């Protein structure tokens, strides 16, 4: 099966993966695996979404989606512009030069920002969101200290 992904975060999942590889080999297939540990994690994704919810709940005048758009545009984009040359070239030519601030915020609904981030970029993004909203008087609990799953 092409394009199958496995999260190998438990012994059971590892066993299932190895069973699948064995089955493929028995059936004459040549499985190919790509190991990737550099992407933003599912835990970071959950943390980010908890933060958006905390902020929206406290602000009261913005939706979770409004907060998500703002954070991606003002905290995520600068991280990627500084560290991802392919993203920077695409963003500068395709978006920045042609859209108003409101249009840029709307574009955050379809523009991959946090999903492009590495683990370290994701951590910096989370820290930046917490720092900036804390300065504005929003009381945030770091999502790693909560049960968000």
Image: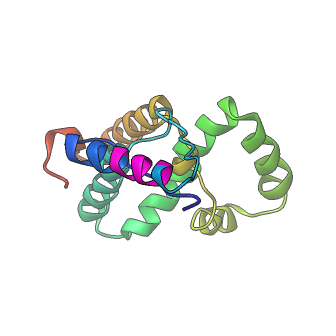
Placement of 65 over or under 68, stated as above or below: below
Residue 138: image x %, image y %?
27, 48
Q: Is residue 44 left or right of residue 77?
A: left
Residue in the foreground of this view, choosing between 89 and 60: 89
| Colouring scheme applied when the structure was drawn | rainbow
Q: Is residue 10 left or right of residue 29?
A: left
Residue 61: image x %, image y %?
35, 70
The residue located at (59%, 35%) in the rendering is 79
Q: Is residue 135 left or right of residue 115?
A: left
The residue located at (41%, 54%) in the rendering is 23
Residue 77: image x %, image y %?
61, 44
Residue 9, quarter of picture = top left
Residue 147: image x %, image y %?
13, 50
Principal SS element in the magenta part?
Answer: helix
Residue in the foreground of this view, choosing between 96 and 87: 87
The residue located at (60%, 63%) in the rendering is 105
Does the magenta segment cover residue 33? no
Q: Is residue 116 left or right of residue 104?
A: left
- Which range is magenta? 18-25
Does the magenta segment cover residue 19? yes
Residue 81, quarter of picture = top right
Q: Which quadrant of the figure contains the N terminus? A: bottom right
Q: Which quadrant of the figure contains the C terminus? A: bottom left
Residue 117 visible in the shown view: yes
How many numbered marks have been drawn onto this rendered protein structure? 0
Residue 142 visible in the shown view: no
């Amino acid at each position: 099966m092409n394009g199958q992904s496995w999260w190998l975060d438990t012994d059971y999942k590892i066993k299932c993966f190895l069973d699948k590889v064995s089955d493929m080999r028995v059936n004459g297939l040549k499985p190919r695996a790509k190991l990737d540990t550099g992407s933003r994690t599912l835990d970071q994704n959950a943390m980010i979404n908890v933060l958006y919810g905390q902020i929206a709940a406290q602000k009261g005048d913005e939706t979770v989606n409004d907060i998500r758009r703002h954070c991606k545009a003002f905290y995520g984009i600068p991280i990627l512009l500084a560290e991802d040359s392919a993203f920077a070239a695409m963003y500068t030519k395709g978006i920045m030069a042609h859209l108003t601030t409101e249009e840029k915020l709307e574009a955050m609904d379809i523009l991959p920002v946090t999903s492009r981030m590495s683990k370290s970029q994701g951590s910096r993004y989370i820290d930046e969101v917490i720092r900036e909203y804390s300065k504005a008087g929003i009381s945030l609990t770091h999502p790693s200290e909560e049960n968000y799953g």
